[in-house]
């Protein structure tokens, strides 16, 4: 609801302003509108592209190990010198990056992972569960398939490690299937594979993320959710310990409750409120082949190839890399080359050409230092909630995050314990 400057006085808590129309903002809007809140989503773009569109489309309860985990730093350093590597940090003197790196390093140990994994597992399983309900309500038009996801391994050593991970997954109640080379090939009869084996995580599902986003937007248009698009938030007007108004390049908006769901731009947004948040944008790349005649059937993470591949009938997306080089959308073609080469190496029978450089997609994952999201109220301001920092798992945690945001705003007990997602934990 746009207001004149003088009208911005009293905060209406029945209104919620969501800043950011990515998967987290839209899932928050979904659950909030169901409870009768009046919603305005503000986004600087028109919600037709961005990180929530060009990703691999996995909902992965299998990913209960946070990104910050033992061995990841050594692995990262090993890859850093190659221009086609799946991991890169642009060396630069930036205090936020140094602080982020310090907390990432501090979190990358077995003790912290053991503490954090159950919390990540809770929100992943909650989200997966909720997705089936959402699908029933918004319709089936986003190519969701519940056939699981393969963790595909080339080296025997990698496969042994994945089998070990499968044991841990079973302890969290997940359904897994350990497959040798021949059994994986039987799942993909049309395309020759070159792997040692795989683990099939059967609870995972996949869908076309861009289609889900557009479907949600269409659903909201019928439900009266307001969108203020092509509008950039530039500041906030404070009133004691709350935010009274959101200032944008198109005018000032009544705040109500505010959900900050700005993805990789969260630190920029919180800074406007005087709050420091540790988060780095992690650039990834993807390319979508519009038609592959003999396509694969299963989505797969190519574990020792460090990239991923997703089919939607005859369409195919390949993607990956994690490039910590700040906010930018520069395409380094060699990184895509690394992804393409891995895909061809694992699937020699796949007839795909290297993508045209101008069609390569990039997106910025919002990466917190410990691999857990930020979900919760800001202690200094009583009407602001942060929801973000889901890194490689924003699609996987979207529905759960939206539900939790709604429960926090309504003052109810949350569906899962959110103490590990505190926004001021660093
Ligand atoms: C290659 C790749 C593959 C991936 N694959 C998967 C996957 O298979 N499964 C999975 O779970 N996750 C995956 N991810 C991660 C997932 O895409 C992200 O975690 C998720 O999209 C983040 O969603 P978000 O809503 O937090 O942020 P975003 O989608 O980035 O949305 C934030 C929005 O805020 C808006 N905004 C920011 N600042 C302002 C401002 N000042 N004013 C107005 N608007 C503003 C932006 O315009 C943007 O639209 C992948 C990511 C990449 C890059």
Image: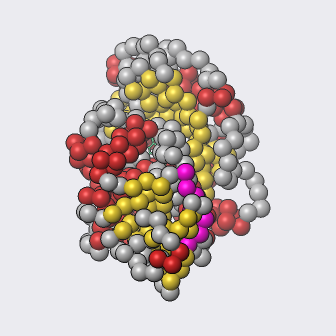
| Residue in the image at 61% along x and 28% along y | 359
Work out whether 389 lies above or below 140: below
Residue 95 in view in this figure: yes
Q: What kind of colouring is applied to the model shown?
A: secondary structure
- Specify the quadrant that holds the C terminus: bottom right
Location of the N terminus (image quadrant) = bottom left
- Residue 234 is inside the magenta segment: yes
Image location (x, y in percent) of residue 413: 26, 72
Rendered location of residue 43, percent (x, y):
51, 54
Q: Could you say which is closer to the camera, residue 25 or residue 161?
A: 25
The answer to whether residue 171 is left or right of residue 271 is: left
Estimate the x, y position of residue 39 in percent, counting from the top left.
37, 61
Asked whether the viewer can see residue 390, the reply is: no
Question: Could you say where residue 111 lies in the image, as x and y percent from the top left?
Answer: 47, 64
From the viewer's perspective, is 355 left or right of 162? right
Q: Nearer the viewer, residue 68 or 137?
A: 137
Query: Image check: 250 left or right of 420?
Result: right
Span colored in magenta = 230-236
Depth check: 233 or 62 in front? 233
Q: How many marks?
A: 0
Magenta segment includes 258 = no
Q: Residue drawn 60% across and 61% down? A: 249
Q: Is residue 273 above or below residue 148?
A: below
Residue shown at 67% from the left, 27% from the top = 357
**Which residue is nearer to you in this view: 412 or 22?**
22
Residue at the extreme bottom of the image, as rendered: 240
Identity of the residue drawn at 38% across and 66% down: 16
């Amino acid at each position: 609801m746009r207001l004149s400057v003088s009208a911005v006085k009293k905060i209406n808590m029945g209104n919620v302003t969501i800043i950011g129309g990515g998967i987290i903002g839209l899932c928050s809007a979904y659950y909030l509108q169901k409870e009768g809140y009046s919603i305005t989503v503000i986004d600087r773009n028109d919600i037709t592209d961005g990180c929530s569109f060009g990703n691999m489309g996995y909902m992965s309860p299998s990913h209960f190990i946070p990104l910050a985990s033992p061995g990841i730093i050594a692995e990262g350093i090993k890859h850093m010198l190659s221009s086609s590597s799946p991991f890169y940090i642009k060396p630069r003197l930036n205090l936020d990056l140094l602080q982020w790196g310090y907390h990432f390093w501090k979190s990358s140990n077995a003790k912290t992972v053991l503490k954090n994994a159950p919390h990540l597992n809770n929100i992943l399983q909650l989200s997966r569960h909720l997705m089936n309900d959402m699908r029933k309500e918004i319709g089936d038009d986003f190519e969701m398939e519940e056939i699981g996801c393969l963790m595909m391994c080339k080296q025997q050593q990698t496969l042994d490690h994945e089998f070990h991970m499968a044991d841990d997954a079973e302890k969290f109640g997940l359904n897994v299937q350990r497959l040798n080379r021949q059994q994986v090939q039987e799942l993909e009869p049309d395309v020759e594979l070159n792997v040692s084996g795989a683990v099939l995580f059967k609870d995972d599902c996949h869908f076309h993320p861009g289609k889900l986003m557009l479907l949600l937007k269409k659903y909201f248009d019928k439900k009266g959710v307001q969108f203020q698009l092509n509008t950039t938030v530039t500041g906030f007007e404070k009133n004691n310990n709350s935010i009274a108004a959101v200032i944008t390049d198109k005018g000032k908006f009544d705040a109500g409750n505010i959900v900050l769901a700005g993805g990789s731009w969260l630190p920029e947004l919180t800074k406007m409120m005087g709050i420091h948040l540790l988060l780095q944008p992690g650039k990834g790349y993807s390319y979508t082949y519009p038609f592959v005649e003999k396509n694969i059937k299963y989505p797969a993470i190519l574990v020792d190839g460090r990239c991923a591949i997703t089919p939607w009938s005859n369409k195919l997306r390949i993607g990956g890399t994690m490039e910590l080089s700040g906010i930018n959308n520069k395409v380094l073609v060699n990184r895509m080359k690394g992804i393409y080469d891995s895909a061809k190496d694992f699937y020699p029978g796949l007839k795909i050409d290297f993508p045209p450089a101008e069609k390569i997609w990039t997106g910025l994952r919002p990466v917190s230092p410990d691999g857990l999201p930020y979900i919760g109220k800001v202690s200094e301001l009583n009407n602001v909630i942060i929801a973000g920092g889901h890194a490689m798992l924003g699609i996987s945690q979207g529905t759960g995050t939206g539900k939790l945001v709604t429960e926090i705003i309504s003052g109810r007990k949350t569906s899962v314990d959110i103490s590990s997602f505190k926004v001021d934990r660093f």
